Image (tube, helix red, strand yellow):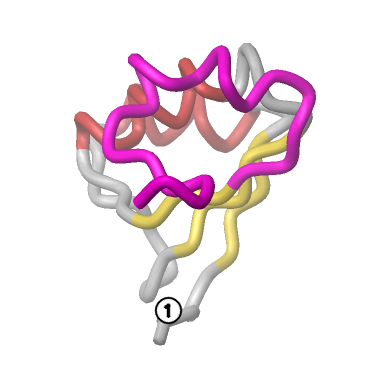
């Protein structure tokens, strides 16, 4: 914490204005935060261990068509 790590993209998105960011998770809440963060950040890399997001279908579609969001599949953070 305190070194660019955030627990709330909704609260901290303005801090990442025009920066490349990363997000780990893909459930409903995480995906809505990814979409919100993409309004501020220059790009958002979503790191996911599988080949499909876990969020409901409409959130998945919105994330996949947002040009600022890059989905990084089959990746684990260690």
Name the residue located 31 percent from the left edge and 53 percent from the top edge.
Answer: 25
Return the residue found at the far front: 2
Residue 24 lies, with reference to residue 6, above or below; the image says: below
Q: Is 44 positioned to the left or the right of 46 in the image?
A: right
Q: Is residue 11 magenta?
A: yes
* Place of residue 10 in the rendered image (x, y in percent of width and height, measured from the top left): 35, 17
Name the residue located 64 percent from the left edge and 29 percent from the top edge.
Answer: 65
Q: Is 66 positioned to the left or the right of 51 in the image?
A: right
Quadrant location, the C terminus: bottom left
Q: Is residue 75 magenta?
A: no
What segment carries the magenta color?
Answer: 1-21
Name the residue located 38 percent from the left edge and 75 percent from the top edge.
Answer: 49
* Place of residue 23 in the rendered image (x, y in percent of width and height, measured from the top left): 46, 49
> What SS does tag 1 mark?
loop
Q: Nearer the viewer, residue 12 or 2?
A: 2
Q: Is 14 positioned to the left or the right of 33 in the image?
A: right
Q: Tell me if mark 1 has few (under 14), some (14-19) or many (20+) residues whose alpha carbon lies within 10 angstroms of its own.
A: few
Q: Nearer the viewer, residue 59 or 14?
A: 14
Residue 71 in which image quadrant:
bottom right
Residue 58 lies, with reference to residue 47, above or below; the image says: above
Name the residue located 52 percent from the left edge and 23 percent from the top edge.
Answer: 37
Name the residue carrying label 1: 77
* Place of residue 34 in the rendered image (x, y in percent of width and height, measured from the top left): 45, 31
Residue 37 lies, with reference to residue 47, above or below; the image says: above
* Place of residue 58 in the rendered image (x, y in percent of width and height, measured from the top left): 34, 23
Q: How many marks on residues?
A: 1
């Amino acid at each position: 914490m305190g070194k660019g790590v955030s627990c709330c993209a909704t609260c901290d998105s303005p801090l990442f204005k025009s920066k490349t960011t990363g997000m780990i998770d893909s459930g409903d809440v995480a995906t809505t935060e990814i979409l919100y963060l993409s309004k501020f950040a220059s790009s958002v890399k979503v790191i996911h261990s599988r080949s499909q997001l876990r969020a409901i279908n409409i959130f998945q579609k919105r994330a996949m068509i947002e040009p600022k969001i890059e989905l990084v599949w089959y990746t684990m953070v260690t």
